[in-house]
């Protein structure tokens, strides 16, 4: 077993080393999905322990010999974020376990942060949230100008805090996918923001504020961000349905749906073919896809 402990928490070394053995029984589940997050009391502090899913055999080799594990990257990048003057739940430790010389399980431990995610803000309306959204735009500009690019810049990975003076601050979580760059250009920014907002209105507001702060052309920046966002959420519809639907042939149905759409647009001049394909599309969309069309990107065709 390999353990790295933040020197500030060296006095908790023994308790930290016990975490893999006690993880199943101790603590309250915060999230249970591909990875499992638990809130656990560790000495006198509350921590969140993230247990990463056991990697498949190829990644076990990669993480053992060629690349840092997700737990180690989480620890290192959290330290980097703090050193750059930004907030993230304070890193406590990381643990790696090995079987037959290959990584099997890994854990990242950080202090508990009681902030809420920005999900409701990003999925909502601009009206009444202008102060929060402007603060978020300023925060994002500061991150990018410091060269910090969170590669999963999504609502669940950003926490918001409000102080007694009604000022807003933010902190980053789930930082194992991150880059430190000397320059972050407009195209990179717009691509990076693609999964942030279900609401196109909210994304437009944020990118307007962002472009203004950076001195970029507002119209072209907003247009580019919306285009990348629409592309992301269109593909998200298909990915989500493929994962969530119980229909045995759902992947084939999605492929046929996409084929029907492409052919229908190509034969737009032929009304009989268009109507036939539209009917087939609408059935698949209404039955399997509409519930995942969070941004209403396809719905207009099937009203």
Image (cartoon, rainbow, N blue to C red):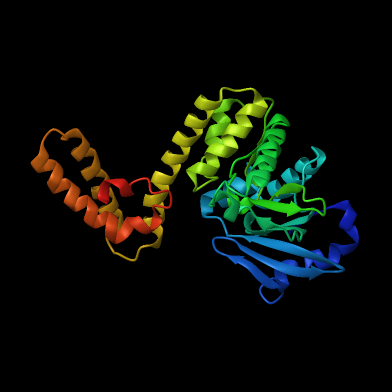
Residue 77, image quadrant:
top right
Which of 213/258 is in front?
213
Residue 15 showing in the rendered view: yes
Residue 3 showing in the rendered view: no
Q: Position of residue 202 (x, y in %)?
A: 54, 43
Q: Position of residue 274 (x, y in %)?
A: 15, 42
Q: Position of residue 174 (x, y in %)?
A: 65, 51
Which residue is at 35% across, 63% downward? 245
Does 231 sit above or below residue 211?
below
Q: Decide if residue 265 is on the left or right side of residue 194.
A: left
Q: Decide if residue 230 is on the left or right side of residue 185.
A: left
Which of 118/127 is in front?
127
Q: Decide if residue 199 is on the left or right side of residue 83.
A: left
Does 16 sit above or below residue 85?
below
List the single residue furthest toward the front.
Answer: 127
Which residue is at 76% across, 61% downward? 112
Which residue is at 62% across, 33% downward? 209
Residue 38, image quadrant:
bottom right
Which residue is at 40% across, 58% downward? 243
Which of 116/250 is in front?
116
Q: Position of residue 118 (x, y in %)?
A: 63, 52
Which of 45/100 is in front?
45
């Amino acid at each position: 077993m390999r353990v790295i402990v933040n020197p500030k928490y060296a006095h908790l070394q023994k308790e930290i080393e016990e975490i893999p053995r006690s993880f199943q029984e101790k603590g309250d589940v915060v999230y249970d999905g591909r990875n499992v997050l638990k809130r656990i009391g560790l000495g006198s502090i509350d921590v969140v322990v993230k247990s990463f899913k056991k990697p498949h055999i190829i990644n076990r080799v990669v993480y053992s010999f060629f690349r840092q594990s997700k737990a180690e990257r989480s620890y290192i990048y959290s330290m980097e974020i703090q050193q750059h003057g930004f907030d993230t739940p304070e890193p406590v430790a990381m643990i790696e376990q090995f079987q037959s010389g290959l990584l099997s399980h890994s854990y990242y431990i950080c202090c508990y942060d009681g902030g809420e995610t920005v999900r409701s803000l990003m999925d909502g309306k601009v009206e009444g949230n202008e102060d929060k959204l402007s603060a978020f735009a300023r925060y994002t500009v500061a991150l990018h100008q410091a060269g910090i690019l969170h590669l999963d810049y999504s609502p669940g990975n950003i926490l918001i805090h409000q102080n007694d003076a009604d000022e807003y601050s933010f902190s980053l979580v789930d930082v194992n996918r991150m880059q430190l760059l000397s320059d972050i250009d407009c195209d990179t920014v717009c691509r990076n923001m693609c999964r942030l907002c279900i609401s196109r209105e909210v994304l437009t507001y944020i990118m307007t504020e962002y472009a203004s702060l950076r001195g970029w052309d507002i119209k072209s920046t907003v247009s580019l961000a919306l285009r990348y966002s629409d592309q992301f959420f269109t593909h998200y519809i298909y990915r989500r349905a493929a994962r969530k639907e119980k229909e045995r042939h759902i992947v084939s149905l999605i492929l046929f749906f996409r084929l029907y759409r492409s052919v229908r647009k190509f034969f737009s001049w032929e009304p009989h073919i268009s109507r036939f394909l539209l009917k087939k599309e609408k059935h698949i969309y209404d039955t399997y896809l509409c519930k995942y069309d969070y941004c209403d990107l396809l719905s207009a065709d099937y009203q």
